Image (cartoon, grey):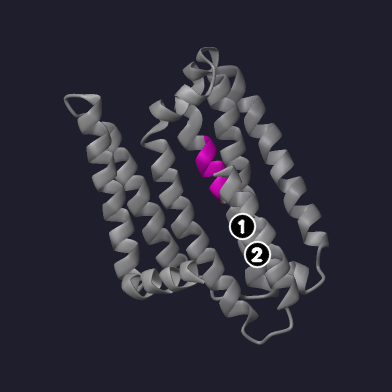
Amino acid sequence: MTLFMQMYRFAAEPFFLANYRKEEFKAMNAAALKYFVLVSMFIFLGIALYRDLFALIVGANFRQGIHILPVVLGANILSGVWLNLSFWYKREEKTKFALWITLTGLVASVGFGFLLIPKLGIYGAAWSRFAAEIVMVVVSIVLNRIYYPTPYQFGRITEYVVLALAIFFVSEWLPMPNQMLQYAFSTLLILLYLGYAVWREKIDVVAMAKHFLRRGKR
């Protein structure tokens, strides 16, 4: 998820800063946020549903905290959402909002940290960061609505988030007889999410495959 975030940041920031004068800036920004969430939730499922396998990457002493991974992934996705919501005020040269939003997130992080960490330990730390990211996203949306209304497709975005979370909880609450069946079931659910996204966005998979094959032959 971190690698995807960095790749997206390095690609998106120069793109939007280079095209900030174009009339379709708002539409491009709205589409970018939608597809960012779509792909991020796919990555979330691919990691969260196989976190036992990813736990093998870290040392044995750190594996007891692997259960906070879904929360950390969620916080990273919210951080990416906040990044997408920052392009408009960079365009409008209102970068003072970045300071306001960051300070709001800092206060929320400290506040939730004092509240949750003594009771929940590392789980409290993960949830406090998640809550802080939510606060920053909400503040960013409010500021956007006031100063630079952008047609973000929050309805469609919510669909992907709800579907991915439903798949995650179904996989968690419906245990299989053995681990291999559990992985197979999780894979089936992830393909369900991917199929829904392709259908919902009317993505021509065949045309896309042909495009990549042509590029590969060059």
Residue span colored magenta = 72-77
Position in image of residue 90 (x %, y %): 77, 68
Residue at image coords 49%, 58%: 37
Residue at image coords 57%, 40%: 130
Please, which residue is most extreme toward the front here?
217
Position in image of residue 100 (x %, y %): 78, 54
Residue at image coords 42%, 69%: 213
Q: Which residue is mark 1?
A: 8
Please, which residue is most extreme toward the top here?
61
Q: Which mark is residue 211?
A: none
Q: Is residue 134 visible?
A: no
Tell me if residue 53 is in the magenta stretch: no
Q: Would residue 96 appear left or right of 126 to someone viewing this image? A: right
Tell me if residue 74 is in the magenta stretch: yes
* Residue closest to the eye, 165 or 202: 202
Badge 1 element: helix
Q: Is residue 198 visible?
A: yes
* Residue closest to the eye, 205 or 170: 205
Name the amino acid type tagged 1.
Tyr
Q: Which mark is residue 12?
A: 2
Position in image of residue 211 (x %, y %): 43, 74
